[in-house]
Amino acid sequence: MRINKITNGLGITPAVVKGRCWTGRWTRLAAVVLGSWLVLEAGPVAAQDLAIKAGRIITVSGPEIENGVILIRDGRIAEVGAGLAIPVDLRVVDASQQVVMPGMVDPHSAAGLSQANERNAVVPFLSVVDGIDPVRSYFEESRRNGVTTAAVVPGNSTMIGGQAAILKTAGSYVDDMLLVRSAGLKISLQPPSGSRMSHLAKLRREFETAKRQLAEKEEKAKKAEAGEGKAEAAEGDKPVEKPAEQALVEGDVVSREGEGLQDPPAEGAAAGGGASAEAASVAAANSAMQDLLSGKIRAFVYCQNAADVGQAFRLMDEYQFAAILVLGPECYPAAGEIAKRGATVILDPTLVFWKRDPVTRKEEKIVLPTIYREAGVKFLFQSNDSDSRQSLGSSYFWFQAATAVSYGLSREEALAALTLEPARLLGIDSFVGSIEPGRDADLVILTGDPLDVSTWVETTLVNGEVVYQRADDWKLKLLLEAAPQ
Amino acid sequence: MSTDRRKMVAGWIGPVGWSVMLLAIVAAVCPCPALSAAADDAATGASSTNAAERAAFRVGELWTGDGQRIADAVLLVADGKIVAVGSVDSTPIPTGYVLHDRRGMTMIPGLILAESGLAEGGEDDELAVTPAVRAVDGFDFFAPRQELLAAGVTTVQISPGAARLLPGQGSVVKLAGESIETRVLRSSESLRVLLTAAAFSPPTVYEPPVGAVSEVRPLLPTQPQLAGNLSGAVTGLQALFQAAGELDPAASLGTAANDVALETLADILRQGKTVRLTARSAAELQAAVDLAIRFELPALIVQPRATAALEQLDWQADAWRGVILSPGVRPGRLEGVWGLAAEDEEPRRQTAWEMAAALVSAGAGDKLALRLESDEDIPHVRYLAALLQQGGLSAEQVLSILTANPARLLGVADRVGRLAVGLDADFVLLNGGPLLAATRVEATYVDGQAVYESQASAETRVVSAGAVFANGQMVPQGRVAVSGGKITSVGAQVSAPLSAAHDHFPGAVIVPGLIDLGTVVGWGAPVSERLPLQTKMGDYLAMDDEAIAAARRGGITTGLLSSSSLPSPVVAFKLGDRPRVIQDPVALRFEVRGNLTQVESSLRRTLQAGKAYHESWVKHDAAMADYQVQLKAYEAELAKYEAEKKAKEAAAAGGEAKPPGDASDKPAGDKPVADKPVGDAKSVESGTPNGKPTDAKPADAKPADGKPADGTPAEAKPADGAATEDPAAPKKPAAPQPPRAQEALEPYRALFGGKIPAIVEAGDALSIRLALKLFRQEFSLQTILAGGPGLEQVASEVATSGAKFIVGPELFGRVDGQSINYPQVLAQQQVPFGFQTKSGAASGLAYAIGFAVHQGLADHEALSAATVGAAELFGLGSTGRLAPGHEADLVVLSGPPFDPSSQVLAVMIDGQWVYRRGAKP
């Protein structure tokens, strides 16, 4: 049952506009689901029930536990504490000289995609699920560095770049990895070229269109309800506007197990032909935008500079949608405004850089974590996957937090910013982000303190399965052996 | 009786007037408790947001922005809004309001620019018609706007792109404010239409943007866009407005068959939004007017260059929203100045003020606003607007063009543009009339919060007062600019950078710092020990000396110090906390006192010894000069000799073998050695076999440019050595031996050399005569007599002898029942003189001089004697005068110099305030 336990209703969002593709896709999806069912039924149940004896457990959500034990059953944490009796049927992993922490949660990354950005500027109907390549080195690197969950989000260069998904970093197929299928819609405020005004005018037009479509849909649903009450309601099942945050956390994202798969593509089927067919097809393609406006999903809004931050807030106010701000390096002048809003933001991967003041012509060292911390902004990190990064360090998720600590962030905050905080922001903190009974057994066993440069990841577990072991990491071995020459 | 009363009243007006004025000065200018308290308020107000929530501003004058001026006004601010405004009598300040006393300042509303490109200036969309674009979307709310706020601009209209026919909607934003919501006054203010040439070359669109519906909407073909020229633009716009007008408002929205741009346009027109028509030439203006009339557009005409087409319009009608003028000139640039530019189609462009005047008489006076040629000019907006006064507009009208008018034009008059109850507390504090050239912005407030406060740099300081004593006369309303410790400019107007710090002393008088030619302060205690004459007294000046501080509180900035045990050296120094030596010694001080016969012989001996020593050096100097001439001749001869010798050797070497490498050496050797620098010649020729004569050269050359006094005997040796080597070589002349140096007599060299004068204290007429006989007649020294008593008997002798005089400490004597005013006697005899205090009460100098003035000395003569005259006695030309290039030593007096009521308000030494009355030390 685990594999599709969190399939969103939006899982059937049309990946392509063409209505005729529906049957094919439907069958394929069904086959996948059926297949996984069979595997689960036939295969050995609970292959990896483990007990980890840890020298130190960093639970993140609670106090650290010295010489504790974590009991793992069915891929989840069953019990955690000091001096627990270890049942005989569990395999014991001895990490009594080591440190165990929750698997890290990368809140924003496009590295799992074979191509981060689309050429077309408005592609709300796309989902990263269709573009994720599980054998990309990003996932391997993630396991090696203790990142067990990642929000894979389309790149920063497409205006409406498609829908993000949250995945575990271990698995052979995308569907094995999926935690949340539709985790949000990526919107970029960075104009590809030309003026910001035009960019926003175009974006606003898309919002207006979606708003209108939503209104039309609701009207239709109301009519249908008043009339025969036919089962035409389809996706617009809950037209009542919920507060966005609440809907995101408890609603559609995690609760509807497999249910979405039964929804037929209502608008497409109902369409007659000609102009109305076109309108219906347009509306269907734009359903992610409608979901955004109705509060079913959130947006990831990329802001290149401070001006964009201001515009992002204006858009959010105007269209009443929830968003996670993904900031570029030049956003720091808006730190005060962000703090006023109480928003948690995802910082640019380049945390420290030099900038020449345009007025005084003086070189200034910009330390983003310090600026945001002093402004009172809660922030998270992302790793740098681009080739243009200035240092190798920024490509390590944990290193970003360590950098912030070296500029004054507290250790506790830094560790939370790697685990529980991103999980909370993404609304998946009931699954990952901390070591508590009931959470997924996504754990990292480290040789020492997580923020210490000399610390190695010894073992990484995802859903209670060992997905990385340093002893078996032949690539690392090769690298280290080659190093002295 | 009645006339007597009148006289009495008249007699009293003076002093009373003064004291009132004084009070005003003290209250308004000095860093008195009231002001510093207010400054503290401002400081706390700027730092914390809560403190300024309820604030009262009291200003000298308040311009409401709609044509009114209120003198001595009060403005009450609560929660960022104006809650009351009026004169101080009609507007009581309720409790709970923090009072900001700014009575020296003028308050105007925050300025408004009716058009700007501050939203991502210069960025144009690819498409020519994009009515959906909104300028506010391109506005960076976090960009620093200090420069604009410093100019007093608080609200701007921002316009979308400037090179397309219909680039979108303008917005109105504030340049500062609590949050983005409060800063956006209108996100959609007007629709911009450009009929100017800049819009006539849009790019050809090759690839229209593809939406999510590419399947059913085919690609549009490549097409050129509107507009290529004015007629194309007009035709295109007519078609657009026509089509937009015909669009069915109910059915249109959302159907993909309709053009989105057209829908937006129709929507904007339906809402009755202002259409902002930019049109410059007469043809463009006519087209704009025609368009507006035909489609009944609420039109705002922007940037006209002629008003003929506009003067006929009915400006009372609401449909004609207004005119936004462009000044047509860039500040500080000669290009484009009216009348010089001839690149345009117009035979003669109207100036902005001509247009303003024409439009005012056409009834559009309250519909005028201003834009600038470039956003770079915004810091100079007040200056550019002030030019409109040339057209006969009043200052109030011009200010309205920057405040109330644009607010009305932009539809934000309920928020900004005036200082009236209920509006946002956006205002500017100025240090003078809003349109005066020299007026600066002191502070800018938005929503009652200070968003800019002038931070004058101490680099340059402008001190202004009711009068300045410069060039021997009083300049009324004068200023002194000071930079780098020097005075850079003096006069009724001075040139100084905008960032200069200003110190204004209304009604006060600025005079040069006084010079005390015989002070006792400087060493921490009076100097009475016998000092060797070579003592550098300047090395022992006391720092942070209270006596020095007391002296300069009396307006003394420069003092001459000597020991009371004479003869003594004299040092001239500035009376700063760290006294600065100007010249050491500046004079030698002698006395003629006691048994005159004895004094005469001993003084003569002393002077003779000094003179002999001096003359021995004079002789030596003459011999040295002679030696220099000989040395030069010798060098020339030596060079000639060497050249010959080299030529001989080269010829010999050439006879044996001639390697090709030598060819390059030879020209170098042939070159006259004298042409080369000595060191250079050495390095080039060190490889040649005959290095010795050249080696000798650098040593020989030394006395030529070195000082004759030191080291000459030592240098003679190598020269001799070189000479003995070759008997044919020219003989080097021997340097003259200097006389034996006697430190104690060294100062006499300066004295007899005429470099420094002798100060001779003489306490009575006989002593004065003796002093004149000895110092003037026998030794012909520059003589400055010091004293006073007895002067009346020998005044003419003093005058004819060419001696000068230091008068003091007694300025006033009484002989045979006659009162004698020594300074006045000296002035009458035209003897150059200065003053000395010779007492601990140095600060009393001004009062003493005041008494002399009271007794008949002309006050300008007294002032000159105490300042420039005193400086000239000792050749201290860099101080004592308020003139460019002189050291910035000045004294600010509350009234006329030496008037009994005048007090020293401030003292500046070397450009630094060393004393401010009322300031804590």
Image: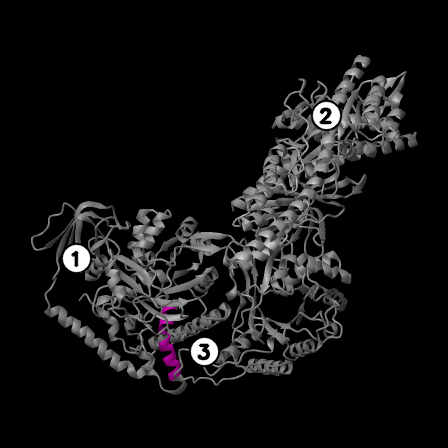
Residue B53: percent from the left, percent from the top? 55, 46
Observer-nearest of B93 and B325: B325
Query: On the image, numbered disc 3 is attached to which residue?
Result: B209
Q: Amino acid at mark 1?
A: Ala
What quarter of the picture does the N terminus of chain B occupy? top right
Q: Chain of mark 2?
A: B
Residue B89: percent from the left, percent from the top? 70, 43
Q: Amino acid at mark 2?
A: Tyr
Q: Is residue B737 above or below residue A121?
A: above
Q: Chain of mark 3?
A: B
Observer-nearest of B804 and A256: B804
Label 3 or label 2, whichever lies nearer to me, is 2
Q: Residue at x 48, y 85 (%)?
A: B221
Left/right of residue A46 with respect to residue B382 in the rendered view: left
Mark 1 neighbour density, 10 Å: few (under 14) some (14–19) many (20 or more): few
Q: Residue at x 48, y 53 (%)?
A: A363
Q: Secondary structure at mark 3?
A: loop
Mark 3 neighbour density, 10 Å: few (under 14) some (14–19) many (20 or more): some
The total number of labels drawn is 3
Mark 2 neighbour density, 10 Å: few (under 14) some (14–19) many (20 or more): many
The magenta span reads A277-292
Left/right of residue B727 with respect to residue B182 in the rendered view: right
Left/right of residue B690 with respect to residue A406 in the rendered view: right
Q: Is residue B501 above or below residue A173?
A: above
Q: Amino acid at mark 3?
A: Pro
Query: On the image, numbered disc 1 is attached to which residue?
Result: A471
Q: Chain of mark 1?
A: A
Separation of residues labelled 1 and 3 (CA atoms): 53 Å
Numbered badge on residue B613? 2
